[in-house]
Every structure is written in C-alpha cells, then in structure tokens.
Image: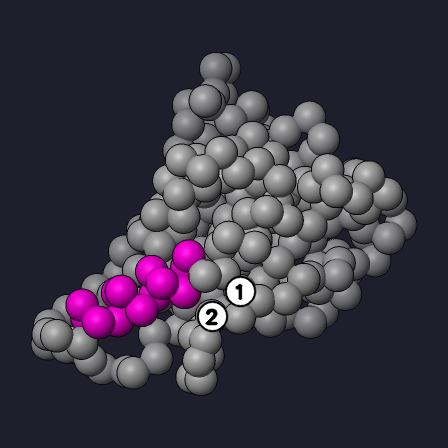
Amino acid sequence: MAQLIATHNNHGIVLAADSRAVHFDSEGNPVYLTVNRLLPLGDRAAILAGGAAQTVDMARSLQAFVSSEGLTDIEDIYTAALPYLGGEYERFMRKECQTLCLDPLLYTYFILAGYTDHDLDRPTRLYFLWTKKRLPRLDGDEITHAFTVPRRIGLEAKLARLTQEGATSEEILEQVRTTLDKLEEGQDDIGGPFVFAIITAEGLRIADFLGVMTPVAGHDERKRKLELWPRAA
C-alpha cells in the first residue's frame, strides 16, 4: 500500500507520498519496507511510484532512461514512459513467476508530474499510469486538477478547490501534510517519513518531514517545521 497525492495549477505542482511498502517473501509472508516513492526526473519533472514495492525499482529504471535520453519536457517523458514502464513491468513479472507467482497481476501505479514548453498557457501536467489485466499492461491518462491513490475523493475536491482559488503551492502543501499526519494516525498501512515536492517554472524542490532524507542547515526537529530546498544535482 502507498498513499500518493498530486495536484496542480498554472502556478505549480504539489506532490506527496508516504514511504511504507510491503513485500512478500518466498513463503508468502509480508515484509514491511521503507521506500522513497518520489524520484526526480531532471529539474522540472518527477515520478511517484505506488502499489507493490517493486514499482520503486521500475521508477528508478525510468529515471536512468530519461536522463540517458536527455528528456526534459513532461509530455515527452510521458510518451516515453508508457512503453518503457510497460516493458519493465513485463520483465519483472517474467522473473517473479519463475520462483513465485502469487498474483498474475502485480498492482502498480505511477504519477508523472512536470512542466511542458509545448503549451505556455497550460504549462503544468499530471499523468496517472496504472496496470490492467488486458494488453497493453500499462495505460495512462491526464489528471485534471487533483488525484490521490488510494482515492480520497473528499481530499481531491478540497485540493481542486484550493488550486482553482489560486492558493500558493506552499499553502496547498501544508494541507497535504496535515492530511498525511491524520492518515498515519488511523491506518497501519500508511507511514512516514513522508516526502513532498513542489515543481514550479523555476524548477523542482524536494523536501521531507523533519529533514530525514536530506539534512537542512539550522533544522530544528522540535518545531516540526516543513522546509523546502533546491534539489541537489
């Protein structure tokens, strides 16, 4: 299980994810892992990986592919990501079913986010990619305003309203952080550390709660303050 949250307007994109994942060993027993579900794809794009823990490895593979191909525009990344991640999924399933095949369909899903130069009037893009039973195994569609996986319709409506009312990315992110805190208190399958990102025309900034992933100068854990900083190259 994973909780992914994404929303956008012309001012920017806000992304968030938890880090709890479950993997089943060779005897079918659950093993709980901590994974980083939010990965940069260059300076103006990122990917969220949800579902099975193996989706993070698929996202890392896409990250390397995007870098090697020099892709920077999110529309170009999305066009390439559909067949690429579909191939990664098929490759993993062939390997997995040689030893253990608990489920012929590994539930995986991704959210791609970033900026495009092809449409200056609507520069931000969000795309949802998911696996399905029929071929091709991976499908995708554009996200209009806000999207959550698993779906939380009330939160999506609230985020969509905030974006349409012109709320800043920082204000929206604070709402997302508060929601994740509440979800962690009530559900065992959602857990931190949480990771957050804001993408604007100036680039991608990634932060996590309490600065776990990347140290921040002068950070004070007692204040539980959310801090953002430029992504390291």
Secondary-structure class at tag 2: strand
Residue 190 appears at what percent x and percent y?
44, 61
Q: Which mark is residue 129?
A: 1
Q: Name the magenta segment's main secondary structure.
A: helix
At x 36% / y 63%, what residue is drawn?
87
Residue 90 versus residue 21 in the image, above or below: below
* Residue 200 x, y percent position in the rendering: 70, 34
User: Residue 21, position in %: x, y?
Assistant: 34, 60
Residue at the spot 31% in from the left edge and 52% down from the top edge = 57
Q: Residues within 10 Å of mark 1 (few under 14, many from 20)?
A: many
Residue range corresponding to the magenta coloring: 84-96
Quarter of the figure that contains the C terminus: top left
| Residue 128 screen position, x and y as percent | 58, 63
Name the residue that disc number 2 marks. Answer: 138
Q: Are marks 1 and 2 in contact (CB under 8 Å)?
A: yes
Along the polypeptide, which appears first: circle 1 or circle 2? 1
Query: Closer to the camera: disc 1 or disc 2?
Result: 2
